[in-house]
Every structure is written in structure tokens, then in C-alpha cells.
Image (cartoon, helix red, strand yellow):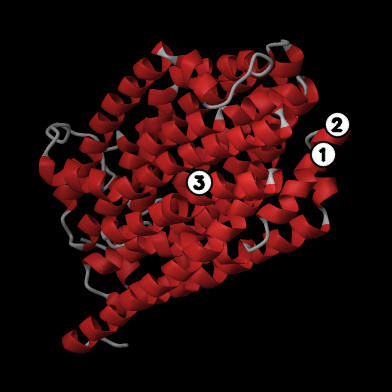
Amino acid sequence: MPQQENSPLILGTERIGKLLKNYAIPGIIAMTASSLYNIADSIFIGQGVGPLAISGLALTFPFMNLAAAFGTLVGVGASTVVSVKLGQKDYEGANKALGNVVVLNLIIGLCFTFASLSFLDPILRFFGAGDATLPYAHSYMKVILFGNAVTHMYFGLNAVMRSSGHPRKAMYATLLSVFINIILNPLFIFGLGWGIKGSALATVISQCISLGWLLFHFSNPKELLHFKKGIYTLKAEYAKPILAIGLSPFLMNLCACLVVLLINRGLKEYGGDLAIGAYGLVNRIIFLFLMVVMGLNQGMQPIAGYNFGALHYHRVTEVTKLTIVWATGVCTLGYIVCNLFPTHIIHAFTRDAELTSAAVYGMHIAFGVFPTVGFQMVSSNFFMSIGMPKQAILLSLTRQLLFLIPGLLILPSLLGIAGVWLSLPVSDSAAFLLALFLFIRQIRKFKKAEAAQGQKP
């Protein structure tokens, strides 16, 4: 098969630095744009509806994490399976993995929608919604849930598109969604007066349009991966590894749901509804930088997965180390900016004095050891990319279950609201040390394998 410019085959031959740049830049642009339109949602809601609406939006975060958990269960696992299959030159297997992605996303997305809509208000109450914030959270999540199956399919197919040698097209699909969302948000909130419901509707419509473009791409029989008969039957040899590898980000998002629940409850107890809104704003800002790291991870994943499948361990190591350097730089920049200009950043969302004060206070603490977060994220992605879900799950779960959740249960009782915020940098510090240990151990194993195979170190 000829090695074309957009062919995934270049993942095994092109220079790592050039590959990572070509694959990561579209991912960074797409993920940053996605984060920016989430921030735009908060800005439009904060300026157009009010500070309690921001708190209502923040209360949906654990619900959104829960929905994302089921979405990443398929999307992340599929991207890794497709990359490894392509590295093994198993093109038929990669196509069948694509078909399994479609079926799994439909089943999981529809089941989650039905179950969540049936118990929407009790779930939101459980997540910390009070009488003042429940109407905002309910209005937002009801619309989002009706589009949940679309969201799952959109993210799943976008991940497969990126892994099959089309990082720029995957970026364009995300940018299309962002562009439409940013146009519709002010139109629905300010122009039509639909409030927070209008923001949710803008999100769903934008993802529907982008999904249409993705479906059009995979309907082209000239593409290496495309829709065709015989690939839509669920088979254990494809569905099982997809779900096994996707289990790590699934559990990570599931734990994130529990974490945000505990954070919201602690903030409500020690600071009230506006403290929840403050965390919502700080979380949006944190995710702006984390989305850049996720974009780097997206660029790294197909390169690492392909070369692991092709047994090019030295290339897996090289791309991972380079990604770590770039990710650490991004998180260090976030640490500097958010500690120097916290008030200016928060004022973009709200001018409410109480909410601003609470958010600035939390931001200084939450960004305390932020430069270490990039390494944690790349290390977890490294193990997912090479099909080692146990290690990825260990890194994901220990950061939240072993370190963060105990901190959220203990520190607030000792330090009040400061304890809620301090639990974040404390858990990040412990998770960094564990990630460093596992990463170094695996790199040493690669070096032994390279020596045994006579590969270039």
C-alpha cells in the first residue's frame, strides 16, 4: 500500500518531533477551542443570566463528568485499538473496530439518556442543588441529555478519525462545533431570551452539525477506514479491548464525578452557593490549560499506539518524553498566569464582588503545584496508548480515590473551606510521585526489550 501524506503509515517512519507537531497542534487547537467555548458558555450565562446561574451550571459538572465517563469508555479505547491495528497492518480489524464504535456509542448513549432523564431532579439534588440553583441546573441538563447519544457518537468518531491519519480533519470537526456554538449562544441567551436552556441547546445543535460532517467523512469508500457492511456486529475481540482500554478514562471521569460532588458539598457547607460558583469558574480556567495537555495527548496517542504495535519501542519512548516536556511547559505557564492575574481573569465572567473574592482565593490554592499535573496526565495517556489499561487505571484512580477523596473528607473538617481547596494540590503532589515511579519502570522495560531485539536505544 502506498504511503500517502495523510496515511497512518508515516507514524512509523517520520521524525517524532515533526509527527508530534503535526498531530498535536490540531488536537491542541481543537481542545483549546472546545475549552474556550465552555468558558464562553460561562461568560454568556454569568453576564446574561446571573451569578446563581453560574452556580447552577457548576452543579451540572459532576453530571457532565458522568456522561463523559461513558463517552470516553468507547472513544478513548477505540482510538487506541485502531492505532494498534493500523500499526499491525490489520486494516480489516481497524474497520471492524470502527463499526463497533458506532454500535457501542448508540447503545450506551441512549441507555444513559433514558436513565438520567427518569431521575433528573433527584440526581441534581444529590449533587448539591438547592431550591435557588435547581431550576438552572435542571433546564441545562435536560437539553444536554436529549443530545447525549449525539455527543457520544461525535466524540467517538472524532477520536477514530484522528487515529486513522486525519488529525486536521478531526480538528476541523471540533472547530466547526465551537464556531456554531459561539454564534448560537448569545443569540439564544440574549437575542431570544432562552437563558441557560439556550446555552445547552446551542451546544447540542453544534455537535449535531459536526457529527453530520464526521458521518459524511466515514461514508467515503476511498478512506482507509469507512462504513461498510459487516462491521457493525459487536464482537468480543474488538468490543472487549475497546472497553478495557477505555475503562481507565471511564473510571477517571467517574471518580471526577464523585470528587466534584464532594467538592460541591464541602463548598456549600462552608461557603454557600456562591462558593460552588467560584469552583465552577476556577475549574473552567484549569480546564483551559488541561485541554492543551489533552491536545498534546491526542497527538501523542496515535504515534505511541502505532509504534507500540509495530514494536518500535524507542519511538514510543521518544514521543512520550517530548510530550511530557511540552505538557509541563503548558502547566507552568498556567501556574504563572493564574497567580499573577487572578482578578482580571475572574472579571471576564462576573463583576460580583463576593463571587470574585471566593474564586480568586480558590485559584491561588488550586494552582499550587499545577506544573506537575502535565506529567501525570501524559503518564496515564502513555499507558492507555500502548494498551496497558491496568497501569492507566491505577494512575487515574489513586490520584482521586486514594489521595483526593480522603483529603476532601478529612481536610475540610480541620480547615474549613481552605481544606476543600487544599485537597487539590495535596493529591496532585502524591499522584505525581506515583506516576514518576511507574513511568520510569516501564521505560526501563522498553530498554530491555530494545536490547533483546537489537533496536536503536
Q: Is residue 171 left or right of residue 41?
A: left
Determine whether the residue tagged by mark 1 lies in a helix, strand or loop: helix
Residue in view at x 50 percent, y 14 percent: 121
* Residue 89, placed above or below residue 433: above
Residue to which mark 2 is pinned: 352
- Give, as a three-letter code, the residue at label 2: Asp
Nearer mark to the viewer, of 2 and 3? 2
Q: Secondary structure at mark 2?
A: loop
172 and 315: which one is in front?
315
Task: Give how far apart the Cα atoms at labels 2 and 3 are.
Answer: 36 Å
Cβ atoms at labels 2 and 3 below 8 Å apart:
no
Label 2 and label 1: CA atoms lie apart by 6 Å
- Residue 126 lies left or right of residue 452; in this view the side is right
Q: Are marks 2 and 1 in contact (CB under 8 Å)?
A: yes
Residue 109: image quadrant is top left
Q: Amino acid at mark 1?
A: Thr
Query: Label for residue 126?
Result: none
In this figure, which residue is indicated by the disc labeled 1? 356
Q: Which residue bears the numbered disc 3?
A: 171
Q: Check disc 2: other Cα within 10 Å, few if <14, some if 14-19, many if 20+.
A: some
Q: Residues within 10 Å of mark 1 (few under 14, many from 20)?
A: many
- Count the numbered circles shown: 3
In the rendered image, residue 391, in percent from the top left (x then y), is placed at 31, 61
